[in-house]
Amino acid sequence: MKFDMKKFMAVLAAMMMVFALAACGGDKQPAQQGNTNDGPSAFELYTQAEEKMAELTDVEYNMDIAMKMAAQGENMDMNMGGTLKQVKVGENDFNLQFNMNMDMSAMGAGTMDMNMYYTNGYLYYDMGQMGQMKVAMDMATAEEQMNVNGMAELDESWVKESSVDGQNVHMVLDGTKMTGLVDDYAGSMAASLQGGEIAMGDVTVDLVLDAEGLPTSYKMVMPMTVTTQGVEVTMDMDMTLDVIATEGVTIDFPEGMDSWMEVDASALQ
């Protein structure tokens, strides 16, 4: 069977957005923690930062992702950049905006913009030439669809090594444990890779905190191997999130969203 790189890249682009959003804050539950001898451990500082981010009403991130891939003697680079905004509008209700630009020149497709919004009980998708659609969805389901709930499932036992240097937090996470988490987040996408499997290498996380313990920068390096259509593809993803605002964030909704084609949520499965 001939390896379909274009199909693989399209699915991979969606998976990359999942990984990127997994690093952002949301309605998190406290992760498990262990004891430390000399102050908080790197994992505890990471967890405390996640909890502080979850308490914010407004937050805006800049995001950059660089991916290097190799398969069947071919090497490809893919870059993505964008912003994610969250504004609280009710006790358990947020408006959300996610704008992403993907450089698809490696597969001969130039650049592609993808925009997602959530407001007034609807999740909106703007796929450019691929069309615009909206799905009736409550807040909890929308957060799950956009993967805003993040990485609260991390367990301290996954940390293979760590260090704290002032406001800089460094962790190396066990790739075998991370593989299970990736399966949870991206399982349906991986399934569309014709029975593909994903295996993570050890994941490096670097966090820079401000004086209040809030993250100002988040960097994650994720090596992985995807086997699909009988072909092994190796990848290294380098993702950086910079927090650029934690108050006064505004969301720019496009005009005419009410006229976007409404589809059933089952169409997104």
Image (spheres, helix red, strand yellow):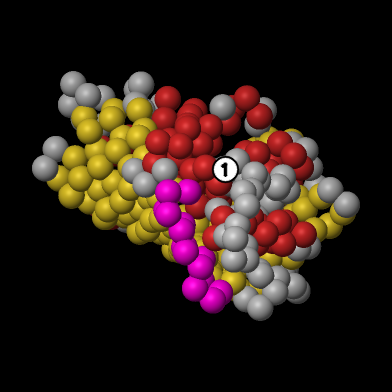
In the rendering, at what x and y percent does residue 69 appear?
Answer: 25, 48
Name the foreground residue: 192 vs 47: 47
Residue 74 appears in the picture as rendered:
yes
* Point 51% across, 68% down: residue: 164
Name the foreground residue: 186 vs 217: 217
**Is label 1 in a helix, a strand or a loop?**
loop
In the rendering, at what x and y percent does residue 168 appear?
Answer: 51, 71
* Relative height, residue 229 to residue 163 (above, below): above
* Point 51% across, 36% down: residue: 181
153 relative position to 157: left or right: right
Question: What residue occupies the far front of the structure in this picture?
Answer: 37
Is 51 magenta? The answer is: no
Q: Give the range drawn in magenta.
A: 159-172
Quadrant of residue 143 in the image?
top right
* Relative height, residue 150 to residue 194 (above, below): below
Name the foreground residue: 234 vs 176: 176
Circle 1 Cα neighbour tier, 10 Å, few/some/many (<14 / 14–19 / ≥20): some
Q: Magenta region, mostly helix, strand or loop?
A: strand
Name the foreground residue: 220 vs 255: 220
> Count the marks: how many?
1
Image quarter where the C terminus lies is: top right
Q: Which amino acid does label 1 sit on?
A: Asp
In the rendering, at what x and y percent does residue 129 appear?
Answer: 47, 47
Image quarter where the N terminus lies is: top left
264 relative position to 7: left or right: right
* Point 29% across, 38% down: residue: 225
Residue at which label 1 appears: 155
* Point 67% across, 59% down: residue: 48
In the rendering, at what x and y percent does residue 123 appear?
Answer: 68, 43
Is 163 magenta? The answer is: yes
